């Protein structure tokens, strides 16, 4: 169940996609310490390619204005699912260049996280940025506080069940990359 809330600075948060810092802040350190915590990380390029095609697919299925406005997804017709592999690769490269030109700044780092993903409310914390590590750290930004960190590309169902016996049966892949 996903819980949503609005903080004192009018930033929406939700339990789905909470960083470790945000989780500890909202639910408390006692609950955090009593829980088994883990994170799945991806190779940065694989993560971005997956993110791009996920957002493109959402544009095909739902209103795209939100993804176009802050994630800069192209909806100008230059990309379609019928595009050649070369055209899809070029669309991805163009998108990455646009993200970099828009959000990378030497002086203002407040939007750097958009190079990697949406903030999901985590952008309210000064420990949050474009790195995957920023999802895993405490309020100091210096200490990784999850119990386990696994690479998505090398994880197996057997490993998950060995480390977390509560996971029984098949792992369902509901958001596979094209």
Image (cartoon, grey):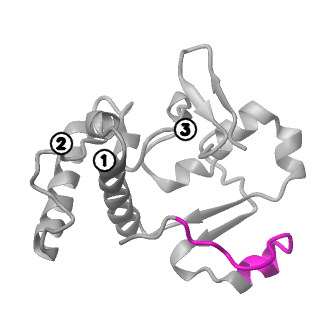
The answer to whether marks 1 and 2 mark residues whose Cβ atoms lie closer than 8 Å is no
Quadrant housing residue 112: top left
Q: CA distance from mark 1 to mark 3?
A: 30 Å
Is 127 a magenta residue? no
Q: Which mark is residue 127?
A: 3
Q: For the magenta stretch, what is the residue range?
A: 159-174
Of badges 1 and 2, nearer the viewer stands: 1
Left/right placement of residue 93 relative to residue 30 reads: left
Q: Position of residue 125 (x, y in %)?
A: 56, 31
Please tell me which residue is depicted at 59% across the width and 46% down the height of the picture. 17
Circle 3 SS class = loop
Q: CA distance from mark 1 to mark 2?
A: 22 Å
Q: CA distance from mark 2 to mark 3?
A: 22 Å
Label 3 environment density (alpha carbons within 10 Å; few <14, some 14–19, many ≥20):
many
The residue that label 1 is drawn on is: 59
Label 1 environment density (alpha carbons within 10 Å; few <14, some 14–19, many ≥20):
some
Say if residue 105 shows up in the picture: no
Vertical side of 103 occupied by 90: above or below: below
Q: Position of residue 8 (x, y in %)?
A: 61, 13
């Amino acid at each position: 169940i996903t819980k949503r809330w609005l903080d004192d600075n009018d930033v929406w948060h939700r339990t789905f996609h909470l960083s470790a810092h945000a989780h500890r802040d909202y639910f408390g350190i006692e609950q955090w310490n009593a829980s088994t915590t883990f994170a799945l990380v991806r190779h940065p390029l694989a993560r971005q390619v997956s993110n791009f095609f996920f957002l493109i697919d959402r544009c095909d299925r739902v209103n795209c204005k939100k993804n176009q406005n802050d994630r800069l997804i192209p909806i100008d017709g230059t990309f379609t699912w019928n595009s050649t592999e070369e055209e899809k690769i070029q669309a991805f490269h163009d998108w990455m260049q646009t993200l970099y030109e828009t959000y990378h700044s030497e002086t203002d780092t407040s939007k750097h996280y958009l190079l990697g993903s949406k903030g999901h409310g985590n952008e309210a914390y000064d420990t949050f940025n474009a790195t995957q590590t920023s999802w895993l750290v405490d309020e100091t930004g210096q200490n990784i506080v999850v119990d386990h960190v696994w690479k998505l590309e090398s994880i197996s169902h057997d490993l998950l069940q060995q480390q977390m016996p509560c996971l029984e049966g098949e792992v369902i892949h509901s958001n596979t990359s094209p």
